[in-house]
């Protein structure tokens, strides 16, 4: 990563003070990075930014009082889309991960991540605009990494399958997706199973990651 005389400015938002302080100290040891501020919640982060303390990247918890990670990411994406969000959370459920990526997060790590992976994720987000945690995707998307090089061009999707993938990237249940597509719940389930087999993934997160990677939906 080539930077000329300018450190990447980092904002840290987490309501656990000890963890936040330790995280900030760690980031300050990373070559090329400097912590601009630490805040307790999304409201304080928003206030700092509105006071012209604008970071390049934000390390963001999901569960926070007064403007949680979901609300904060949505606000950043709308008002400061150039600020890149890297989630650091204890939540590893599919719904939280999908929602954060859909709202505009560029990466998602669990809080037990090793410092080396945190640095790797920050570098990747700054240089490539995305980082998919091996732990999170590996835990929830079995087999996805084995097919990371498969592009959509290698797989033929019909329009209904593409539409199903787009709806999958929302918070709708599979039953509700079926209603949106004017098909039965059984047919919606058939689409899901067919895409699992065709894309060689095994969870909804796998479908979402494929859709994001291949431009079927935009973050």
Image (cartoon, rainbow, N blue to C red):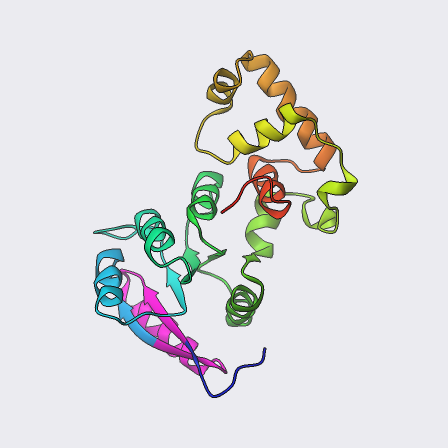
Spot the residue most to the right: 154
Q: Residue 196, percent across and down? A: 67, 31
Name the residue at 23% across, 64% down.
Answer: 50
Queried whether the magenta region covers residue 34, the answer comes back as yes
If the image is split into quadrants, where does the N terminus sit? Answer: bottom right
Q: Residue 3, percent across and down? A: 53, 82
Which of these two is toward me, 63 or 130? 130
Q: Is 180 displayed left or right of 21 in the figure?
A: right
Compared with 213, 122 (above or below) is below
Compared with 101, 131 (above or below) is below
Queried whether the magenta region covers residue 218, the answer comes back as no
Q: Residue 187, percent across and down? A: 61, 15
Residue range highlighted in magenta: 9-35
Name the residue at 29% across, 73% down.
Answer: 37
Q: Is 77 displayed left or right of 108 in the figure?
A: left
Residue 26: which quarter of the image? Answer: bottom left
Compared with 35, 59 (above or below) is above
Residue 84: which quarter of the image? Answer: bottom left
Q: Residue 39, percent across and down? A: 26, 66
Spot the residue most to the bottom: 5
């Amino acid at each position: 990563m080539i930077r000329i005389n300018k450190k990447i400015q980092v904002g840290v938002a987490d309501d656990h003070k000890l963890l936040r302080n330790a995280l900030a100290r760690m980031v300050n040891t990373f070559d090329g990075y400097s912590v601009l501020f630490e805040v307790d919640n999304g409201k304080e982060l928003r206030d700092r930014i509105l006071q012209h303390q604008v970071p390049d990247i934000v390390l963001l918890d999901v569960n926070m009082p007064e403007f949680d990670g979901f609300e904060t990411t949505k606000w950043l994406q709308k008002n400061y889309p150039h600020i890149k969000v890297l989630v650091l959370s204890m939540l590893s459920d599919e719904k939280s991960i999908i929602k954060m990526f859909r709202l505009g997060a560029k990466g998602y790590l669990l809080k037990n991540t090793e410092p080396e992976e945190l640095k790797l994720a920050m570098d990747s987000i700054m240089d490539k605009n995305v980082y998919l945690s091996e732990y999170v995707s590996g835990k929830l998307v079995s087999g996805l990494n084995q097919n990371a090089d498969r592009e959509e061009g290698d797989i033929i999707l019909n329009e209904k399958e593409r539409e199903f993938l787009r709806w999958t990237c929302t918070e709708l249940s599979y039953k509700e997706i079926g209603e949106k597509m004017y098909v039965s719940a059984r047919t919606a389930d058939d689409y899901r199973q067919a895409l699992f087999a065709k894309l060689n993934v095994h969870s909804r997160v796998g479908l979402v990651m494929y859709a994001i990677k291949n431009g079927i939906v935009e973050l």
